[in-house]
């Protein structure tokens, strides 16, 4: 365990003088900053600090570095890997006051934003200018863009448009000793030295604190078509994914939902407009988008031809924006619905998409071996399968002892298939014990060395990834 200093009255006095009422030390103020959306984990910080400027972040980190106080960056706390949990107490550094979109550059198709802006608000703001920021995690209505950068978030649109890393051009960050730097340049091409910008993306708040973000934008598509396809076999639904791409079609969304994922979400939301027959085992939600509706209709026709090779039931085409929104809402609320059912453990596996049927088979085989129930859904178009393992009636002993063994076995199969542990949720606190499956010792040592260069005292988001 790291040998951090304990927070003192002098420390609180320094922070209070710097931030005034935005230094929160009462227990009732700190409780909500001790958890995110990761299972039922909670770690109470000693103090919550809410700076509003880069200079204030710099002073806080410089002070904490000198005093050897642990600092955990905190955003909207919607994460699913425990990345924002202050496991050693200390300071929860909330970025929620960094909530301004600073500049939308219509000429260069860029936006400069602070990290505490809600992702959907950013998307809506640039859409008003006819521009598009595609990454759209399920929590886009509440998560912060800074957290998206820290976790390299994806979402349904990733299959066609890529993930967060594909849009980050430049970052202003504060290093653990308080120094302020820009990591790159506001350009589309950059071959000048090491790519520190991309090093920060996905680093889960362990290397620096992000205070400004420059994102690339693209023209917003004007049209989209959406269909929901019921399958009598979950394996065939997975097989159909790769077949669609082999036909030369790149959907803007291709989502997989196992039967329980859809029916549980219907019960959770009260939305039963989608008929789910007893024999339906899985559904694919398929979207195409672009600027020419005739072209999109042709793409849908080609998808229909592909689907003729599989056993599907009647395909539902969304006929209005309201119906499209309803279908996407069902998909986005699957995670909440599963969480409401029982104690659960969510894995964020990703494999090459052709291996998706085999991955699903391993999930079911391993869960059966350990008497576990799984509910699977995810971004099938890019091979990202969210595996939710439900405790149900299992005893505490079975849950604590068998679950880690089953997960390790699953991750080994994922890596054997050419995949890795997490597609978009990150490693954080809850997956770090499995990193040896994904990487040999030499690779992990290189990562630790990078952490040491940036943060030699280890004060920034300690206890994560390694």
Image (cartoon, rainbow, N blue to C red):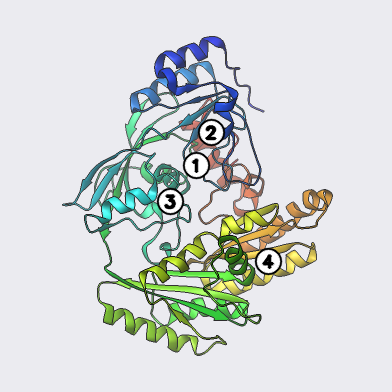
**Do the residues under discs 1 and 2 have CB atoms within 8 angstroms?**
yes
What residue lies at 44% left-to-right and 89% top-to-bottom? 305
Q: Residues within 10 Å of mark 4 (few under 14, many from 20)?
A: many
Quadrant of the image occupied by residue 298? bottom left
- Residue 416 shows in this picture: no
Give the number of marks: 4
**Do the residues under discs 1 and 4 have CB atoms within 8 angstroms?**
no
Residue designated by label 3: 141
Q: Is tag 4's residue or tag 3's residue first in the polypeptide sequence?
A: 3
- Residue 156 shows in this picture: yes
74 displayed left or right of 127: right
Q: Is tag 4's residue or tag 2's residue first in the polypeptide sequence?
A: 4
Q: Position of residue 416 (x, y in %)?
A: 63, 64
Q: Is tag 1's residue or tag 4's residue first in the polypeptide sequence?
A: 1
Marks 1 and 4 sit apart, C-alpha to C-alpha, by 27 Å
Q: Residues within 10 Å of mark 2 (few under 14, many from 20)?
A: many
Q: Is tag 1's residue or tag 2's residue first in the polypeptide sequence?
A: 1
Q: From what the image shows, is residue 364 above or below residue 22? A: below
Residue designated by label 2: 461
Q: Is tag 3's residue or tag 2's residue first in the polypeptide sequence?
A: 3
Q: Secondary structure at mark 2?
A: loop
Q: Position of residue 10 (x, y in %)?
A: 52, 9
Q: Residues within 10 Å of mark 1 (few under 14, many from 20)?
A: many
Q: Secondary structure at mark 4?
A: helix
Quadrant of the image occupied by residue 300? bottom left
189 displayed left or right of 463: left
Q: Nearer the viewer, residue 362 or 25?
A: 25
Q: Is tag 3's residue or tag 1's residue first in the polypeptide sequence?
A: 3
Residue designated by label 1: 204
């Amino acid at each position: 365990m790291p040998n951090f200093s304990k927070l003192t009255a002098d420390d609180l006095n320094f922070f209070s003088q710097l931030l005034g009422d935005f230094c929160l030390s009462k227990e009732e103020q700190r409780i909500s900053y001790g958890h995110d959306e990761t299972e039922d984990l909670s770690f109470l910080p000693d103090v919550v600090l809410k700076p509003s400027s880069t200079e204030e972040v710099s002073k806080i980190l410089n002070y904490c570095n000198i005093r050897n106080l642990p600092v955990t960056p905190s955003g909207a706390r919607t994460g699913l890997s425990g990345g924002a949990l202050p496991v050693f107490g200390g300071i929860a550094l909330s970025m929620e006051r960094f909530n301004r979109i600073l500049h939308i550059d219509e000429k260069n198709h860029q936006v400069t934003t602070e990290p505490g802006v809600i992702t959907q608000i950013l998307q809506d703001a640039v859409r008003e200018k006819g521009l598009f920021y595609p990454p759209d995690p399920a929590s886009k209505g509440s998560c912060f863009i800074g957290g998206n950068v820290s976790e390299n978030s994806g979402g349904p649109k990733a299959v066609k448009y890529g993930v967060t890393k594909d849009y980050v051009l430049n970052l202003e960050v504060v290093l653990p000793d308080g120094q302020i730097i820009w990591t790159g340049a506001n350009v589309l091409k950059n071959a000048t030295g090491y790519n520190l910008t991309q090093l920060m993306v996905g680093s889960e708040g362990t290397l620096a604190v992000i205070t400004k973000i420059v994102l690339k934008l693209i023209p917003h598509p004007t049209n989209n078509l959406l269909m929901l396809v019921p399958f009598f076999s979950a394996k065939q639904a997975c097989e159909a994914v790769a077949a669609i791409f082999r036909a030369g079609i790149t959907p803007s969304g291709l989502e997989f939902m196992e039967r329980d994922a859809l029916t549980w979400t219907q019960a959770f939301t009260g939305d039963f407009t989608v008929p789910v027959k007893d024999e339906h085992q899985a559904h694919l939600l398929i979207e195409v988008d672009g600027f020419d509706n005739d072209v999109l209709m042709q793409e849908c026709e080609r998808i229909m031809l592909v689907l003729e090779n599989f056993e599907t039931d009647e395909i539902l085409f969304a006929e209005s924006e309201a119906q499209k929104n309803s279908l996407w809402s069902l998909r986005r609320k699957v995670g909440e619905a599963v969480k409401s059912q029982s104690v659960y453990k969510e894995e964020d596996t990703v494999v090459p998409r052709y291996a998706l049927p085999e991955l699903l088979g391993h999930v079911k085989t391993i869960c059966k071996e350990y008497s576990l129930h799984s509910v699977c859904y995810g971004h099938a178009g890019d091979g990202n399968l969210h595996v939710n393992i439900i405790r149900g009636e299992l005893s505490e002993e079975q849950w604590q002892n068998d679950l880690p063994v089953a997960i390790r076995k699953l991750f080994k199969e994922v890596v054997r298939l050419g995949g890795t542990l997490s597609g978009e949720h990150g490693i954080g606190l809850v997956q770090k014990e499995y990193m040896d499956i994904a990487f040999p010792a030499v690779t992990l040592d290189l990562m630790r060395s990078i952490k040491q260069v940036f943060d030699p005292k280890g004060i920034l988001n300690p206890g994560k990834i390694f």
